[in-house]
Image (tube, rainbow, N blue to C red):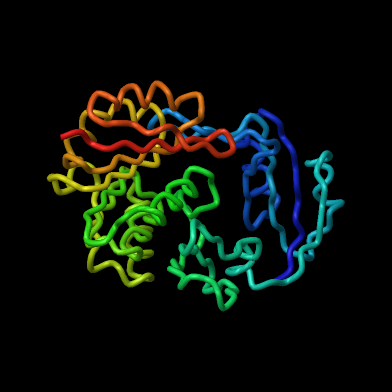
Amino acid sequence: MPFLQLTLSIGSADPAPFEDALLAAGAASITLEDDGDDPVLEPPPGSTPLWPRVRIKALFDSATRPDALRASFPDATFEHIGDRAWEREWLKDFRPMRFGRRLWICPGGQRPQLDDSAEAPCLIELDPGLAFGTGTHPTTALCLEWLDSAPLHGKLVVDYGCGSGVLAIAALKLGAAAALAIDIDPQALLATRENAARNQVDARLTVAGPAEAPQGKTEILLANILAEPLMELASSFAERVAPGGSIVLSGILRSQAAPIASRYGAWFDMHPATVRDDWALLHGLRRF
């Protein structure tokens, strides 16, 4: 069905009174968006911070007159939104993305266009969702490209901070024997299970929170999380990786790479950081 969309920039003001007023005025839905280029990169555990500048979008029945809302929201702008297949509308800007030579993330059942000379693709069907990690962020892309180039056949892989499960799923589709996906967020665990089943690798994947996850050595541990937990978990990760195994760390800024590499250097021979758009990936080999 069509809607009238109201858009209102509120800066750093508390959005709660605006949300209450919009709901009282008859809004069918309300969305908060970043009104600048101010990503929230490393919030404290348990917090849900907003951006420094917030934009609110509210949808009203198409019969609602903008003049009836301007008295309460004088700075708002209005737009009539036509009827659409809303359950697919949010996917319209996503296309298949390639990582390395053969790995593709394909949203919404899409498939890449390949020429005859292209290497046989490895396809992962995955829609962007609530859980982080679909390949659109540089840190996820760096991890996927590392996996595409790594010798994975027959190996056990741990994806710590799995988000959508994309790294574990990619490892399994690229030849890993089994994978363990770990996350503190129940939504991430649910998304990982669903995505693994969708890609027919769920039989080789174990999904668990940190307290329930099986212990034991792994040949590859990937952690695409944040700098602070990477520092805190260094000794635990070192204990998990078998001698000669790989540690792959991302979710970190270029400026954070050196201290993290130094910390992990107590157990691993660390390679130079791979950097993209000021984000970094670190790879190290566990010493015997």
The residue positioned farthest toward the bottom in the image shown:
116
Q: Is residue 198 toward the left or the right of residue 81 in the image?
A: left
Residue 91 drawn at (x, y percent): 60, 64
Identity of the residue drawn at 33% across and 69% down: 197
The quadrant of the image that shows the C terminus is top left
Q: Position of residue 6 (x, y in %)?
A: 76, 51
| Residue 2 drawn above or below residue 134 | below
Q: Quadrant of residue 263?
A: top left
Vertical placement of 255 versus 276: above or below? above
* Image x and y of residue 65, in percent: 83, 58
Q: Residue at x 55, y 74 (%)?
A: 117
Q: Position of residue 240 (x, y in %)?
A: 18, 40
Q: How many marks?
A: 0
Classify residue 248 by image quadrant: top left
Q: Is residue 259 above or below residue 239?
A: above
Q: Residue furthest front?
A: 117
Residue in view at x 51 percent, y 29 percent: 254
- Residue 14: image quadrant is top right
Left or right of 104 on screen, residue 65: right
On screen, residue 151 versus residue 143, left or right, reads: left
User: Which of the image's four quarters has the N terminus?
Assistant: bottom right
**In percent of the image, x 57 and y 71: which residue is there?**
112
